[in-house]
Image: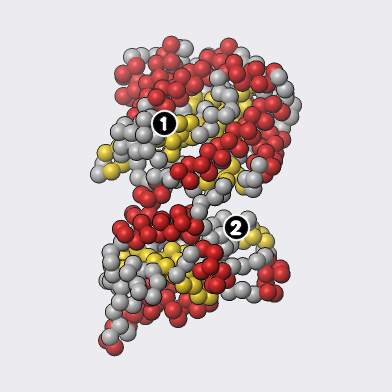
Amino acid sequence: MKISRAEFARRRKHLMSMMDSNSIAIIPAAREVTRSRDTEFVFRQDSDFLYLTGFDEPDAVLALLPGRRQGQVVMFCRDRDPTMELWNGYRAGPKGVVERYGMDDAFPIDDIDEILPGLIEGRGHIYYSMGHNDAFDRRVMRWVNRLRRQSRTGAKPPGEFTDLGFLLHEQRLIKSAAELRLMKKAGDISAGAHARAMRECRPDRFEYQLEAAILHEFAENGARSAAYTSIVGGGANACVLHYVENRDKLRDGDLVLIDAGCEYQGYAADITRTFPVNGRFSLEQRAIYDLVFKAQLAAIRKIAPGGHWNQPHDATVRVITRGLIELGLLKGKEKDLIKSGAYRDFYMHRAGHWLGMDVHDVGDYRIDGKWRQLEPGMVMTVEPGIYIAPNNRKVPKKWRGIGVRIEDDVVVTESGCDILTANVPKDAEAIEALMAGS
């Protein structure tokens, strides 16, 4: 299961169709990043570069040149080097890039300073995303300034820069059938990991032990990396939105909130489940859990083509505000509490975000100041939550320290939406049944 070479070619062709005819797009690969002294973090390719090439090596640059007779797709990459490959692994090299990845031409990365300025020369427009790679930004400007200095001798430097993301990120926002298959696989693997965590949870185990079970499940099923740092927060730690220490002991009577998803073939999953450490919800925990669950279902019902981005969030706000009034945690009229934002003491984040190659994926949420309409192929998370801080003295003590979030990955379809992460329980009774059976 992977993206075909033909699909990568279609992506490049589509992007070039939106570019000016006399232009060039320059897309650098990610760099290796030092972890400590002479060790590096595990390499993860830049998402834009990976989207257009499928090439997973550092020290590479893609150039797209619409209409160029000698070839519109040019890559610079590391040359083959038997000695370095013996130490650090095999390289495709320029020949391999052409043969295996469908580039029209390829050159050693060491030759880029001599060759790429010649490809830029005469092109009136450069598409390039400034501000993401300072060192490469300076390099691009050196090439352009060299051409400007040579303009008296007939060189033609480009006259205009445009952020490549303006075109490319809109393209990435709509997922193809092949992308959705990979995202469904990522969702299935991640769902299995959450179900495993539920089965293995016991009082007096540590948060990091559940994290280890999740990561093991990812790797066992072909997902070598988490899409983001996993959150495993027991008790009051669940009220810290981005808690990642994952070091405390899980206590009998507490809830544990797990926000974790794998990355599979470059695509992310993002799931949150909250469940009782001992396998049984208390009355207060169940009341908050059922309210969040109801809010999530209301949001998912709003996801369909033609609806707008903010409708699911608005639905969660209405359900949560009304429910908090019924539980006595908010006092006043629903409309007034929503207008004043009083619910934000308990629900302080939005209901979701785009999802794809990046966990918080690319794509604008507003177009010309208005919430954008949903279209088939868009993938979003739906993740309402309620967090009652342990030091919140505005509420009775029995509610304090309860944090609940429920999150799934949802794709917009022609007729509504599908949940990509449905293979893990979220109904409270189903969660209790799974944990009791373990």
* Residue assigned mark 2: 43
Mark 1, residues whose alpha carbon is within 10 Å: few (<14), some, or many (≥20)?
many
User: In this rendering, is residue 177 above or below 81?
Assistant: above
Left or right: where does residue 325 sit relative to residue 78?
left
User: In this rendering, is residue 406 above or below 35?
Assistant: above
Residue drawn 53% across the image and 61% down it:
55
User: In this rendering, is residue 40 above or below 426?
Assistant: below
Picture quadrant where residue 249 is located: top right
Q: Residue furthest right?
A: 204
User: Where is residue 231 drawn, in percent x and y?
Assistant: 60, 36
Tell me, yes or no, if residue 425 can be seen here: yes
Please name the amino acid that badge 1 sits on: Cys
User: Where is residue 279 drawn, in percent x and y?
Assistant: 67, 19
CA gap between label 2 and label 1 equals 34 Å
Residue drawn 50% across the image and 79% down it:
111
Residue at disc 1, secondary structure = strand
Picture quadrant where residue 125 is located: bottom left
**From the viewer's perspective, is the residue at label 2 or at label 1 nearer?**
1
* Residue assigned mark 1: 417
Please name the amino acid that badge 2 sits on: Phe
Looking at the image, which is closer to me, 366 or 391?
366
State yes or no: discs 2 and 1 in contact (Cβ < 8 Å).
Answer: no
Looking at the image, which is closer to me, 124 or 337?
124
Between discs 2 and 1, the one toward the N terminus: 2
User: Where is residue 390 drawn, in percent x and y?
Assistant: 56, 24
Residue drawn 53% across the image and 44% down it:
182
Residue at disc 2, secondary structure = loop
Residue drawn 40% across the image and 59% down it:
12
